[in-house]
Amino acid sequence: MRRDRGDGDAVGDLVGRARDGDPRAVARLISLVEDESPLLRLVTAALAPHTGHARIVGITGSPGVGKSTSTAALVGQLRAAGRRVGVLAVDPSSPFSGGALLGDRVRMQDHALDREVYIRSMASRGHLGGLAWSTPQAIRVLDAAGCDVILIETVGVGQSEVEIAGLADTTLVLLAPGMGDGIQAAKAGILEIGDVYVINKADRDGADTLRRELRSMLALAERAEGDWRPPILKTVASTNDGLDAVATEIDRHHDWLESSGELAVRRTRRARDEIEAIALTALRARWGDVHGRSELDDLAQQVAAGESDPYAAAETLLAEL
Amino acid sequence: MRRDRGDGDAVGDLVGRARDGDPRAVARLISLVEDESPLLRLVTAALAPHTGHARIVGITGSPGVGKSTSTAALVGQLRAAGRRVGVLAVDPSSPFSGGALLGDRVRMQDHALDREVYIRSMASRGHLGGLAWSTPQAIRVLDAAGCDVILIETVGVGQSEVEIAGLADTTLVLLAPGMGDGIQAAKAGILEIGDVYVINKADRDGADTLRRELRSMLALAERAEGDWRPPILKTVASTNDGLDAVATEIDRHHDWLESSGELAVRRTRRARDEIEAIALTALRARWGDVHGRSELDDLAQQVAAGESDPYAAAETLLAEL
């Protein structure tokens, strides 16, 4: 779609204001990408030259481990060090979006008037793939807006944890003692994605047992010389205890990412997934996945009826590109 | 890839023998599709005209509910009714495949010499998408080989349950009392995919409580007039108790699928997913996802470096098709 000059100027102006730290410009840009605006293409192009600075930190863990409190405390820690912070609170199951904060985010309100902190809730609405689609775009906005660190917090249900890990440079996995289930309930997936493990509510009984269990499970993973070895930290986020060490480990992990070359690998992989997702969405639109009845539907009916086979149908589809 | 006449004849002969009930021909065809043989394309085309007869039944549930025993008992029930049965035991985490039966499948051995029963274990090895890739192909073989009913049993870990439900006409969800967790542990996903719920080990304490809990959870789902209402059955698979009712409900569900038009909808959707998966795999191969360094990698590096944006990169990729 060709856009007139005016759209390009308006987008350029918005990006400029976002880079100056105007929270309304940031909000508007995120809405444009989240709502799959026709301007999305222009916005993404205007942001690109200003991206690549931010450290992207995913925060995940089961419900009840204190993710919101920990995120708020970590924001305080990062602000005390003078860093500009972006927070994306991602709830894949929520129909709400557009910056509304969750009810229990009282502590996050401490940062609500700080212009160097941008907080945004995101839901996975939209038909183009939800979380996987809109979160990288919102990260791009916050990165271009000069955030030094972007925290992505997920409500941590199922698949979203793994998706978050795919988007982040550094993934924090939170656990807590006294959840009634211990380490057993922590899905195996969680034990593969963590770069830093945090046992929150460490003033409760069972914190040391949990740490021991976690340590022996992590010891099972094969790691080569020079590989990152995920540390296990203890915090009490509600009183800020231990958050300084969390911030330090995030920086230490980032240094390792840079010196090992892994940062470039992760970011290239992420860009690759994003490019492919965009290309496939465009193809699906051509085949009619978005716009209803189509060539693909006709072919599927023929295959279901035994009149064709899936390979022949796929060849027909590809021949039309 | 162009094949000579000889390959086509050999495949046609194999398909003919499979349709006559030769278990070695069935085994060979499944190996060809599972191993992504160069003949895959020919095999799929030769099978197509003979597919669409079999009723495809998925069997899922947490480890320990008695899936293997229930599957074996259901095979007995279907054989007593004179039906030809195929069984695919799918273990997405297993590196083993090729017909090896799991150690605890003693009861399934009862059927090992019955030529009207074909039993096959499948693993999700292979680089083209594992379970989602090879299981539909194996179903196609068993369908063309004249199976009246194909049972797909999964070990039931995570995502595989939902995948199985996507492949089946009718999905059986198994539960059992005394698993220590009750219905709470049954992931919400399981409660959405069941067409027939079976409480196995129903001679144990807690079966009625479990049924009550399950019934109230299922009652929360909104169903319109004419929608299928999943029944909840009780079985003791180890003594065959209640298996006749399970077979009856599978048939009743199939009748509903046919009369409501839902069978055609499900099978067309399945064909559509399969066509799209094949087409996307072909595209990924062109972009280098399979064959290493490529155009897509170069574009991803430019995006990661802020020299390009993902939309521009996706357009470049698509322009080359």
Image: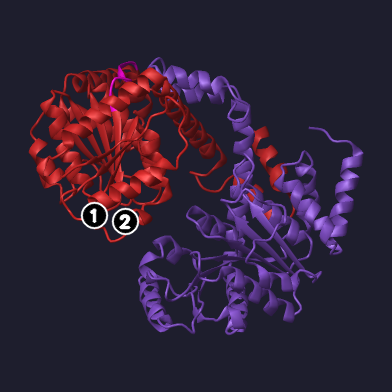
Chain colours: A red, B purple
Does the rendering let one see residue A126? no
SS category of the residue bearing label 1: loop
Question: Is A200 on the left-hand or right-hand side of B24?
Answer: left
Measuring from the top left, give residue A283's x and y in whole percent: 54, 35
SS category of the residue bearing label 2: helix
Mark 2–mark 1 Cα distance, whole angstroms, equals 9 Å
Please give the residue where the numbered disc 1 appears in the rendered image.
Answer: A206
The reply to whether dot 2 and dot 1 touch (C-beta < 8 Å) is: yes
What residue is at 33 percent from the left and 32 percent from the top? A170
**Mark 2 belongs to chain:** A
Question: Is B108 on the left-hand or right-hand side of B2?
Answer: left
What residue is at 39 percent from the left and 42 percent from the top? A218
Q: Nearer the viewer, residue A279 or A256?
A: A256
Quarter occupied by residue A55:
top left
Type of amino acid under label 2: Gly
Question: Is A46 on the left-hand or right-hand side of B131?
Answer: left
Q: Nearer the viewer, residue B17 or A5?
A: B17
Image: magenta residue range: A49-55
Q: Is residue A317 magenta-colored?
A: no
What residue is at 11 percent from the left and 47 percent from the top? A106
**Few, some or many C-alpha atoms within 10 Å of disc 1 (few <14, some 14-19, many ≥20)?**
some
Measuring from the top left, give residue A37's x and y in whole percent: 34, 33
In this view, B251 is above or below A81: below
Q: Nearer the viewer, residue A21 or B184?
A: B184
Please give the residue where the numbered disc 2 appears in the rendered image.
Answer: A182
For the N terminus of chain B, the image quarter is top right
Type of amino acid under label 1: Gly
For the C terminus of chain B, the image quarter is top right
Instruction: Choose mark 2 or mark 1, whichever is in front.
Output: 1
Measuring from the top left, give residue B286's x and y in whole percent: 63, 27
Does the rendering let one see residue B108? yes
